[in-house]
């Protein structure tokens, strides 16, 4: 029911089949970084390893930056997927389109009357029949992946293992805790507590917090630390940290992020 979902799924499946160069572009806050981590993690499971770009808060500002588009063009990416941003980036995304880059926009912010020249997934856009309008940015990314899993006729248990990231985005972005968000968050919290990713365990140890976590803990313990990475240094480190499976790297990044939070 999400407008443009079928076309977006077909384009993403083509990128997987042809092993195209794909760039994930996300905002530097919790919603954006969890969306990038979710997409990178899941597409890697499906055989496509993507690069990702998080803009510098102070040098580039919010949303799709000129520097980010310069990077996408210079590196020769075939497909750009914006996550938790892009709905108002008509000019910047127009440059990417003119350079031959296909674009999927996954966003949940209120659109302008004119949309970017892209495959836009946003339940708030006109003529979108999706019944729940208050998904987080990461939630919209999750829907794209769910559509892809359905199209490929894959069992979705591997996808649901990444719902901890969706729950984190829902709590941190203060979207409505009703309807589908309530279900996604409940499932995500259950996943987080049953099989916590090593990155979260490392930061919880530094924060002197133990499992199980409530949504309040997500909002006041995990979320501020991820936000601090984007505000003090680089949001890309938060994505690196969430995705890492190397214990030494996780410990080092967790310490850096926790120190950033103290400074903030």
Image: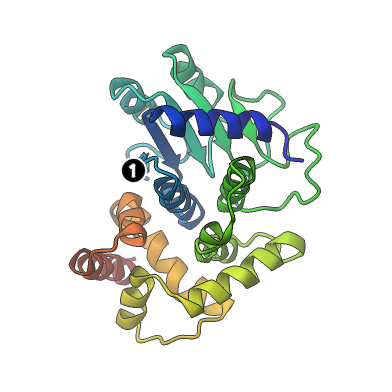
167 sits to left or right of 261: right
Q: Secondary structure at mark 1?
A: loop
| Residue 190 sits above or below residue 149 on the image | below
- The quadrant the C terminus occupies is bottom left
User: How was the colour assigned to the protein in this rendering?
Assistant: rainbow
Residue sitting at 61 percent across and 27 percent down? 119
Q: How many marks?
A: 1
Give how far across and how far down residue 168 sits, in percent.
52, 65
- The quadrant the N terminus occupies is top right
Residue sitting at 42 percent across and 39 percent down? 24
Give how far across and how far down residue 182 sits, in percent.
70, 67
| Residue 253 sits above or below residue 62 on the image | below
Mark 1: few, some, or many residues within 10 Å (few <14, many ≥20)? many
180 sits to left or right of 158: right
- In this rendered view, identify the residue nearer to me: 179 or 197: 197
Residue sitting at 39 percent across and 40 percent down? 48
Which residue does the numbered mark 1 point to in the structure image?
56
| Residue 243 sits above or below residue 101 on the image | below
Quarter of the image where one finds residue 65: top left
Q: Residue furthest top?
A: 98
Quarter of the image where one finds residue 163: bottom right
56 sits to left or right of 251: right
- In this rendered view, identify the residue nearer to me: 190 or 10: 10
Give how far across and how far down residue 183 sits, in percent.
70, 67
- In this rendered view, identify the residue nearer to me: 259 or 200: 200
């Amino acid at each position: 029911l999400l407008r443009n979902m079928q076309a977006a799924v077909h384009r993403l499946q083509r990128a997987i089949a042809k092993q195209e160069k794909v760039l994930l572009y996300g905002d530097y806050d919790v919603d954006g970084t969890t969306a990038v981590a979710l997409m990178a993690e899941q597409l890697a499971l499906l055989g496509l390893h993507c690069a990702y770009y998080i803009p510098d808060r102070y040098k580039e500002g919010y949303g799709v930056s000129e520097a980010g588009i310069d990077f996408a063009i210079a590196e020769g990416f075939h497909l750009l997927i914006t996550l938790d941003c892009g709905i108002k980036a008509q000019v910047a995304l127009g440059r990417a389109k003119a350079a031959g880059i296909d674009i999927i926009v996954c966003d949940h912010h209120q659109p302008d009357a004119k949309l970017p020249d892209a495959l836009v997934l946003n339940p708030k856009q006109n003529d979108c029949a999706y019944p729940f309008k208050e998904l987080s940015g990461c939630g919209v990314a999750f829907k794209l992946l769910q559509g892809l899993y359905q199209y490929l006729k894959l069992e979705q248990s591997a996808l649901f293992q990444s719902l901890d990231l969706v729950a984190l985005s829902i709590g941190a972005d203060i979207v409505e805790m009703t309807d589908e968000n309530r279900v996604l968050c409940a499932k995500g919290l259950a996943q987080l507590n049953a099989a916590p990713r090593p990155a979260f365990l490392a930061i919880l140890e530094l924060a002197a917090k133990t499992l199980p976590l409530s949504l309040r803990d997500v909002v006041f313990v995990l979320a501020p630390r991820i936000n601090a990475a984007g505000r003090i240094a680089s949001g890309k480190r938060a994505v690196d940290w969430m995705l890492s499976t190397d214990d030494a790297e996780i410990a080092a990044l967790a310490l850096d992020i926790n120190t950033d939070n103290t400074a903030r």
